[in-house]
Image: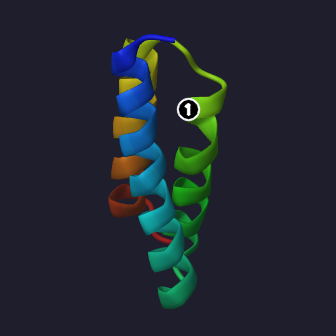
Amino acid sequence: MHTASLLLSLLIGSLGVGYFIYGKRQSRGAALLSGGAMAVYPMFVSNVWVMLGLGAALAAAPFLLDF
């Protein structure tokens, strides 16, 4: 595992936990699901560019979707 992928997975995972907590407290389904996905998917993706793209898409999802 490269240093970049390790640090990026730590950053995305912590952002995902924050989205998950926000979504649970505010009853926002999009933030809850996006945060859960962001906390889990870095364990399965090792390519830095794919991880960055998925992270950006999941971080933007609560702003684009509202349920």
The residue under label 1 is: 42
**Circle 1: residue type:** Pro
From the top left corner, tell me how far across and down residue 34 is, in percent. Answer: 53, 55
Q: Is residue 3 above or below residue 54?
A: above
Residue 38 visible in image: yes
Colouring scheme, one of rainbow, by chain, secondary structure, one colour: rainbow
Q: How many dots with numbers? A: 1
Kindly state the secondary structure of the residue where label 1 is placed: helix
From the top left corner, tell me how far across and down residue 13 is, in percent. Answer: 48, 47
User: Is 63 displayed left or right of 25 in the figure?
Assistant: left
Quadrant hosting residue 45: top right
Structural crowding at the residue carrying mark 1, measured as other residues with C-alpha within 10 Å and reported as few (<14), some (14–19) or many (≥20):
many
Quadrant hosting residue 24: bottom right
From the top left corner, tell me how far across and down residue 17 is, in percent. Answer: 50, 62
Residue lying at 44% horizontally and 26% vertically, measured from the top left: 6
Tell which of 16 and 7 is nearer to you: 7
Q: Is residue 56 above or below residue 35?
A: above
User: Is 17 displayed left or right of 53 in the figure?
Assistant: right
Residue lying at 64% horizontally and 43% vertically, measured from the top left: 40
Pick the quarter of the image with the C terminus. bottom right
From the top left corner, tell me how far across and down residue 60 is, in percent. Answer: 34, 50
Residue 57 visible in image: no
Q: Is residue 4 above or below residue 24?
A: above
Residue lying at 53% horizontally and 68% vertically, measured from the top left: 20
Q: Is residue 63 above or below residue 56?
A: below
Residue lying at 52% horizontally and 65% vertically, measured from the top left: 30
